[in-house]
């Protein structure tokens, strides 16, 4: 999923760890090594009046090693959080508060991306954990401003987003997920 | 589908029948008796910020015999028209020009409703024809004003729309289609 | 989900808890109180040659209090297990080794059932945990023999499975899930 | 869709044209120029025990001009025929009577392929007509023997079926449809 640590900001939303029976960060890390975690992946798109996808929004991020990667909006579903609320929260976190996303009415994802810590089992890989991610195409109407650790948000045509150049800039199989999304909306060439 | 004749207004969009090789209204009627026609059904909904369905819009129509029925937005896909354009056209035709529908990015319908001229083959029935209808849930954000032959547009909660009372006011299986739509969006009790 | 403890048999499949960094049963229980768990729900069906659903298989189970409930095939996805393998494993566990299930080719579930420990947030409820369950309709061709703690497997028609009587025998929202499944396959009346 | 005339064999299934009000072949041809026709496209696949797609079946056909093309199972839905019955009929017609296809329980297609007589509107094109095709991935378990005008049926891996070489051998956008199908089943690289 993303190269940046996703847990700390999330954990601010969680009850304080002083609570009786609550896991410490070390225990969370241990759980992470033994349970699949639930994620959501959102493919932000601009659509025209007929719903046809005009462009795909990809975040530009710098890796700890200084190279640039493009990424989807992605993050964990918290305890006692609905999938649709997690989707909204991560989109607002990454695209800002006025992106005006159209969260899907149906919980049916277009696919389930299984990120394994071992590469090669599926097209998806996450060295940190086993994440099972519900993937949605999410039209956004408003003004998107990359937040936090994203350097930029670029809107590419479906053709550009599926091109070899852009695919090479995506990691952990998210390039494949973009192409699956474009196939789903009828925009894979 | 609808109780009102749907062909005449549509046919205004088609090339004139004087064109060489073009079917006359009689021939269209004959074709209708021998080919399945392609339709779209739209279930108009209001959603909250998280995409959760808050209410369902049903048209109120008077039948030729004077009784009242509730109906979905429904109509034929024309020759050389994309499904998404047919969906937009029928929503604007029935809900007015400022309904601001969010036409789905994906052509994947939540179901295919097969309206047979013979009752009982599927839950759907259309005495006039065999229609194969691609069904979509369509959030609308704008101001909806029933047009043409609809008397009113009522916004009901998912629970009300699935209630026995409202179901009894729908014909040709559209009540079932509403319940299938609510099942799809996770709002069937 | 099920009323029976689902973790112990699963944990036999997991690496031994002596392993460095591995959670103890107490820690697993704690994780369970702080992370949503990934589940699969399978609706076993018999289909005819055209794929039309003829009957739905429901397990009959005795609760600790001695009452009878009907249940779907349901269980957790393990660490490093693919969703499709979890689906196969739970079907074999509940229906026996020669059920010959047709595991779906696509990972796209027909819905995502969110079981919350708090009732009323969604139609689904699990007092033990927050489980996010990917739900699939799974045709089975072979001989099904209820295993383990199930007393029987009953094949009901879609109409029977959606009837008030049978719905009242299902718990935690699984009755709703059966009706959503029947809506998805076009067999909700 | 296919390069071979698809209507004559179909029409054998239809009531005789002597029937009152029945269209003559000329009138059918005229209707074809003014109404979108309903088709089904089936992507035949072999799956393993877990439902994972192992290979894709493509028909090898000779065009009237003598070149070779690869094609999906494809054909029209007849008047008063259910979509699932059309799917079964076309698979048996093209793959033989013992292919043992697993027709999907749900009528929800993975996509809707809109074949326009004008190229470029969608990725799909059919010079003869406007066809709206419901597309399904169909696992087949039995022995497949190409029938009628197909010279051969080749089983390719998902990677081979999506390769540039094989894609170049498909016409009218069916190569895109194969890639959309592989995206849907999680086998698009």
Image (cartoon, coloured by chain):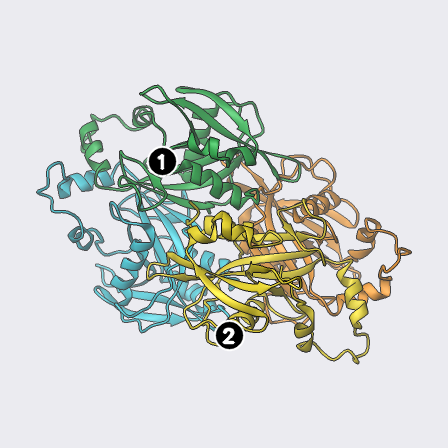
Chain colours: A orange, B green, C yellow, D cyan
Residue B141, compared with residue D57, is above or below; it is above
Chain to which the residue tagged by mark 2 belongs: C
Where is residue D186 drawn, in percent x and y? 53, 62
Give me the disc on residue C96. 2
**Are the residues flagged by discs 1 and 2 from a single subunit?**
no
SS at circle 2: loop
Does residue A160 appear in the picture of this structure? yes
| Vertical placement of residue A40 versus B33, above or below | below
Which residue is pictured at 50% across the width and 50% down the height? C165
Depth check: give the residue in front, A7 or A119: A7
- Examine the rendering and report whether any part of residue B22 can be seen: no
Identify the subunit bearing mark 1: B
Residue with the mark numbered 1: B172
Q: Residue at x 61, y 71 (%)?
A: A120
Q: Which mark is residue C137?
A: none
- On the image, the x and y values in percent for residue D50 come to 51, 70
Q: Quick one: which residue is furthest to the right in this view?
A: A18
For disc 2, the neighbor class at 10 Å (few under 14, some 14 to 19, many from 20) is some
Q: Residues within 10 Å of mark 1 (few under 14, many from 20)?
A: some
Q: Nearer the viewer, residue B138 or B97?
A: B138
């Amino acid at each position: 999923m993303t190269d940046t640590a996703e847990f700390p900001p999330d954990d601010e939303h969680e009850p304080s760890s002083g609570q009786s029976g609550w896991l410490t960060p070390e225990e969370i890390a241990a759980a992470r090594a033994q349970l699949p975690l639930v994620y959501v992946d959102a493919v932000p798109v601009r659509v025209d009046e007929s719903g046809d996808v005009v462009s795909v929004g990809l975040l530009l991020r710098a890796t700890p090693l200084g190279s640039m990667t493009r990424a989807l909006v992605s993050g964990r579903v918290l305890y006692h959080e609905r999938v649709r609320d997690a989707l909204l929260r991560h989109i607002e976190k990454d695209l800002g508060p006025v992106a005006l996303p159209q969260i899907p009415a149906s919980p049916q994802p277009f696919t389930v991306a299984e990120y394994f810590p071992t590469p090669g089992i599926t097209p998806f890989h996450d060295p940190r954990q086993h994440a099972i991610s519900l993937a949605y195409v999410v039209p956004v109407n408003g003004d998107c401003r990359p937040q936090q650790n994203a350097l930029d948000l670029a809107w590419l045509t479906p053709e550009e987003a599926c091109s070899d150049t852009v695919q090479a800039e995506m990691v952990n199989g998210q390039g494949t997920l973009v192409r699956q999304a474009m196939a789903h909306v009828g925009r894979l060439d």
